[in-house]
């Protein structure tokens, strides 16, 4: 009698988790955050809703974790193509602050225009404005880790005299990050490499005659 192999519960759980991530991101992109439900995610993923509740306490938790996972997948893909893990989020320090900021903001433009990221991130950002808890988690888990990278890069520039000592890096980064986010969210105009390059030039050199 041939003994049947024991099912791999770990592999099955990972397959279900991945299906739930995909379903959550797809739904929030299609119908928006308010109309996305645990039941809908479960149905789209082909799992029971009890499976979702076993791992997460709310749809916000599911969506935020799914979005973080999407970023990790992009990092792994970059590493597989010869880049360093997390390279697309790291801000390089080549000694040329303007070039380094332009590099990472161009990567941000690519991500914001990628349909896989755009629909769910736009839905989550918009809902975070009216949903205090979701907004707080969105900022804490998704935005702050990226903003800290800008702070670190600006501080390193201060240490070598490329930025004035009295400048607050946390405020300074808003000169180029906030306009990009606003233009993207409100669709007031297209975002592009030329636009983000100009933001960096204006932020670093100001508007007064040189």
Image (cartoon, rainbow, N blue to C red):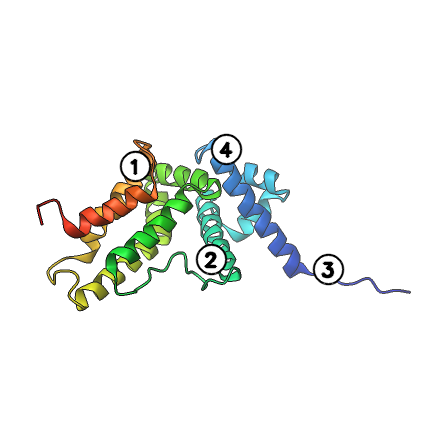
Q: Tag on residue 30?
A: 4
Q: Tag on residue 183?
A: 1
Q: Is residue 201 left or right of residue 67?
A: left
The reply to whether residue 100 is visible in this rendering is yes
Q: Tag on residue 7?
A: 3
The residue at the point 43 percent across, 60 percent down is 86
Which residue does the numbered mark 2 point to in the structure image?
Answer: 75
Q: Is residue 135 above or below residue 161?
A: above
Q: Nearer the viewer, residue 107 or 2?
A: 107
Badge 3 local density, few (<14 within 10 Å), some, or many (20+)?
A: few
The residue at the point 41 percent across, 56 percent down is 88
Whole-angstrom CA distance, mark 2 to mark 4, is: 25 Å
Task: Give residue 144's position: percent from left, percent from top.
Answer: 31, 54
| Disc 4 secondary structure class | helix
The residue at the point 28 percent across, 47 percent down is 197
The residue at the point 59 percent across, 47 percent down is 19
Q: Earlier in the sequence, mark 1 or mark 4?
A: 4
Q: Are marks 3 and 2 in contact (CB under 8 Å)?
A: no
Task: Give residue 137's position: percent from left, percent from top.
Answer: 36, 49
């Amino acid at each position: 009698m041939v003994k049947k192999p024991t099912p791999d519960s770990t592999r099955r759980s990972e397959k279900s988790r991945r299906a739930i991530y995909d379903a959550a991101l797809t739904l929030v992109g299609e119908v928006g955050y308010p109309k996305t439900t645990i039941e809908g995610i479960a149905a789209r993923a082909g799992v029971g809703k009890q499976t979702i509740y076993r791992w997460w306490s709310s749809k916000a938790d599911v969506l935020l974790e799914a979005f973080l996972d999407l970023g990790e997948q992009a990092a792994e893909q970059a590493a597989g193509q010869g880049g360093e893990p997390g390279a697309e989020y790291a801000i390089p320090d080549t000694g040329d602050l303007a070039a380094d900021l332009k590099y990472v903001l161009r990567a941000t433009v690519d991500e914001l225009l990628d349909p896989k990221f755009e629909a769910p991130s736009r839905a989550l950002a918009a809902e975070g404005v009216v949903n205090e808890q979701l907004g707080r988690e969105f900022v804490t888990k998704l935005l702050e880790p990226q903003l800290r990278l800008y702070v670190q890069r600006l501080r390193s520039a201060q240490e070598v005299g490329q930025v004035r000592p009295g400048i607050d890096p946390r405020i300074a980064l808003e000169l180029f990050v906030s306009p990009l986010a606003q233009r993207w969210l409100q669709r007031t105009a297209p975002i592009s490499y030329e636009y983000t390059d100009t933001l960096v030039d204006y932020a670093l050199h100001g508007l007064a005659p040189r």
